[in-house]
Image (cartoon, grey):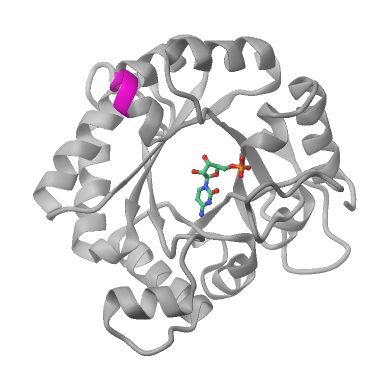
Amino acid sequence: MTRASSPTVGATVHPIVTPIVALDVADRSAAQAVVTRLGASCGFYKVGLELFAAEGPDIVSWLRDAGKSVFVDLKLHDIPNTVRGAARSVARHGASLLTVHASGGAEMIRAAVEGAQEGATSAAGATASGGCGILGVTILTSMDGAGIGEAWGRDQVDVTREVVRLAGLVATGGGAGIVCSGHEAAAVHASFGTALGLLIPGIRLPGGDAHDQRRVMTPRAAADAGARWLILGRAVTGAPDPVVAMEQVAASLAGAV
Ligand code: C5P
C-alpha cells in the first residue's frame, strides 16, 4: 500500500491508496508471467471475467497462495439469493474485493455483503485478512447519458447524478465502496466521504498513452479525487519495464503529478 501525502489542492485525500494491477489476460500462464515480472512491487491483482471464465475460482486461490490480495471483478447482477451464493463462493476462495452492479438494488447488495461475510469466515476464506468487501459498479464508463437513457427508458441522464444515486444504494446495502470514473469520484466523495471506498480505473502515468480510454487520470489526480483503490492496466502491464511503472505510480501518489 502507498501512503499519499497531504494534497495541496482539491478534495481530501483518503490516507491510503492501494494500486491494483489488472490481469487482463487469457489464462493462468499469462497471469503468472505478469505476477512473476512484477514480483514484490505489486501485492494486489484484479481478476476479471476473461481470466475467471478461463480458470475458474482456482485462479483466486493461486494468487492468494502467492501472497497476493485479489479483487474479483465479476459485476454480478441477479436475484439476491443467487448473488449471495456467488459472493459466498468467491469469498471462500480468499478474494478481498468483489463487484456487483449497484443497479441490482440495495437488497441484492445486502445479500452480496452477507454472502461474502459467510464465505470469508469459512475455513479457506479465512486466509483473506479483512474479509471480502463488496463494491458496487455504478455506470460503466462505456456508457454515456444517452445510452443509459435508452437502456433504462428515460430521457437524457445526468451521469454524475446517477452515479451518486447508485452510490446511495451501495451505502444502504452495506457495500464497502463503488467503482466509478475519476471524473465522478469527487462528487461521490463529497456526498459519502470515506464511508464508501472509491475504486478508480482509467489510470495513466503522467504523459502516458491513454489507449482506448477516453477519460484518464494520473494516480495523484485520482487520489486527490478521493480514490481508495486504483486499477492499473496497460499503464503498468504494457510498460517497457512494469516494475519501473509501479515505482512511477508510487512517485505520482507521493508527489504532485
Ligand atoms: O488501464 P487500462 O485501460 O489498460 O485498464 C483497463 C482495466 O480497467 C480493465 O481491467 C477494465 O476492465 C478496467 N475498467 C475500466 N473501466 C471501467 C471499469 C473497469 O477500464 N469503468
Quarter, ligand 1: top right
Instruction: Give how far across and how far down residue 79 sits, in percent.
Output: 12, 55
Residue 124 lies left or right of residue 204; in this view the side is left
Quarter occupied by residue 227 = bottom right
Residue found at x 63% / y 61%: 182
Rendered view: 6 above or below 93: below
Q: Is residue 227 visible?
A: yes
Rendered view: 40 above or below 156: above
Residue 43 lies left or right of residue 78; in this view the side is right
Q: Which residues are magenta?
A: 53-57
Q: Nearer the viewer, residue 128 or 33?
A: 33
Instruction: Give how far across and how far down residue 69 sits, in percent.
Output: 49, 25
Residue found at x 83% / y 34%: 248
Q: Nearer the viewer, residue 191 or 207?
A: 207
Quarter occupied by residue 20 = top right
Q: Is residue 67 visible?
A: no
Rendered view: 1 above or below 183: above
Rendered view: 77 above or below 68: below
Residue found at x 19% / y 51%: 111
